[in-house]
Amino acid sequence: METDVTVYHNPKCSNSRGVLEILRERGITPHVVEYLKTPLDAGQLKVLVAACQVPVRELIRSKEAAFAELSLGDPALDDDTLIAAIAAHPVLLNRPIVVTPRGARLCRPPETVLDVLP
């Protein structure tokens, strides 16, 4: 069944693959955005962060080399700086992020996707 569910996905991520499996088991065919192949720009990232209703820092992968190289752990950095860093280095975006009519959520572990399913 076609739905208005979008998954920001990295096929190398087991959590991301798990979310897709849960959706497909429920007959949901999501719109899949492989954000490493099609990076989001700063404006799109701002919309996504706002939809998730969490601080930008909760959507950043702190274990990536770029996180340390760019000193993104510095608490003085504002949201615009963090979003610009994610836009320039898409690998910094945590995943999977699922957007549905019920909201948007970082789905780690994958079962948290159930909270936002229509």
Image (cartoon, rainbow, N blue to C red):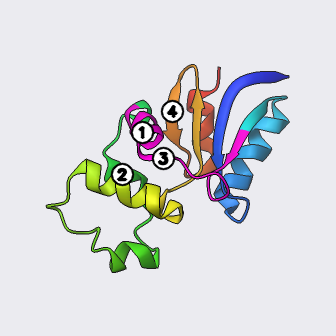
| Residue displayed at 69% across by 62% down | 14
Return the x and y of residue 57 as percentages of the image width and height: 33, 54
Asked if the residue at tag 1 contacts the one at tag 3, i.e. Cβ–Cβ closer than 8 Å, the answer is yes
Mark 2 burial class by Cα count in 10 Å: few <14, some 14-19, many 20+? many
Q: CA distance from mark 2 to mark 4?
A: 17 Å
Q: Give the residue number, with chain letter if any, for mark 4.
A: 104
The mark found on residue 41 in the picture is 3
Q: Is 48 contained in the magenta span?
A: yes
Q: Identify the secondary structure beneath mark 1.
A: helix
Q: Give the residue number, with chain letter if any, for mark 2.
A: 83
Return the x and y of residue 42 as percentages of the image width and height: 41, 46
Q: Earlier in the sequence, mark 4 or mark 3?
A: 3
Marks 1, 2: nearer the viewer: 1
| Residue displayed at 43% across by 36% down | 52
Instruction: Give the residues in magenta.
Output: 32-50
Q: Identify the secondary structure beneath mark 3.
A: loop
Q: CA distance from mark 3 to mark 1?
A: 6 Å
Marks 2, 4: nearer the viewer: 2
In-image side of 31 versus 2 (left or right): left
The mark found on residue 43 in the picture is 1
Asked if the residue at tag 2 contacts the one at tag 1, i.e. Cβ–Cβ closer than 8 Å, the answer is no
